[in-house]
Image: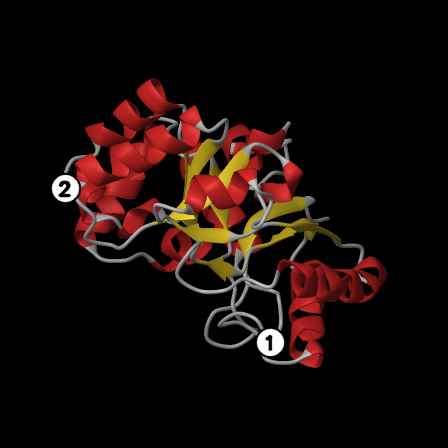
Amino acid sequence: MKDDFTDIHHHLMYGMDDGPATLQEAQAMVRAAGEDGIRKLVVTPHVAPGRARFEYGLFLERLERLKDCAGREGVVLKPGAEIFFTEATVRHLRDQRVPTLADTRYVLVEFSPDIPYPEMLVAAESLLIGGYIPFLAHIERYQCLVSRPQRVLELKRQLSARCQINCSTVVQGRGFTVNRFCRKLLEDGLIDAVATDAHNVGSRPVMMSAAYRVLTKRFGLAYARYLTGAGGGVFS
């Protein structure tokens, strides 16, 4: 029997992102998520406040349409976004022009892979001052953190940041250096969520149950359940 997973990073929204182009493709993704044991799913299209228009009303309209299919698969959908941090991010969040993660104070935020660490600190601090908790998407992609893992602890201690890595990284790896970085953070309990970052059912599918098996074997059942939301996770 599969655990009930929570996926906080999933590009399910159709026609507005780089995931599924059609409702039918999105429905196939919902079915795949349900079959993989995902019971709560946050829909997180890419958003770049102030740089590209985000049609929030259309997003909510299509989310409601997807909920019908999701309900039949036993999956609960919640609104969210993967926000590329810009100087307009906090303002757009306050004006409710972009969604937080599942209507919480958490904000799934991403940066350019080569962002300098001081810029990341300033961004995280501005979110915290604005009343939000930064949730760093796929932190294994940021060279400023991979090169100095101790910075992750600084972000968590000083700015209450939360950290997410992708299921594909857990299952397939991303090379020696990144694998060592992720293993160190997982051993130290510094990762808060593993998520699929799914975009389709082919090249970028869900891998939550596979990641769960790897995490359980390497880091224990309790932490695996926390990371995948089976044990409540960071939203509990």
Disc 1 on helix, strand or loop? loop
Which residue, given by chain and number where applicable, does mark 1 sit on?
15
Specify which label sits upstream in the sequence, 1 or 2: 1
Mark number for residue 224? none
Does 32 sit left or right of 222 as displayed? right
Q: Residue furthest top?
A: 157
The vertical placement of 39 against 28, above or below, is above
Does 46 sit left or right of 144 as displayed? right
x 69%, y 44%: residue: 4
Q: Quadrant of residue 61?
A: bottom right
Residue 123: x and y, percent?
32, 37
The vertical placement of 7 against 226, above or below, is below
Disc 2 on helix, strand or loop? loop
Within-10-Å neighbours for mark 2: few <14, some 14–19, many 20+: few
Does 231 sit left or right of 1 as displayed? left
x 37%, y 48%: residue: 85
Mark number for residue 147? 2
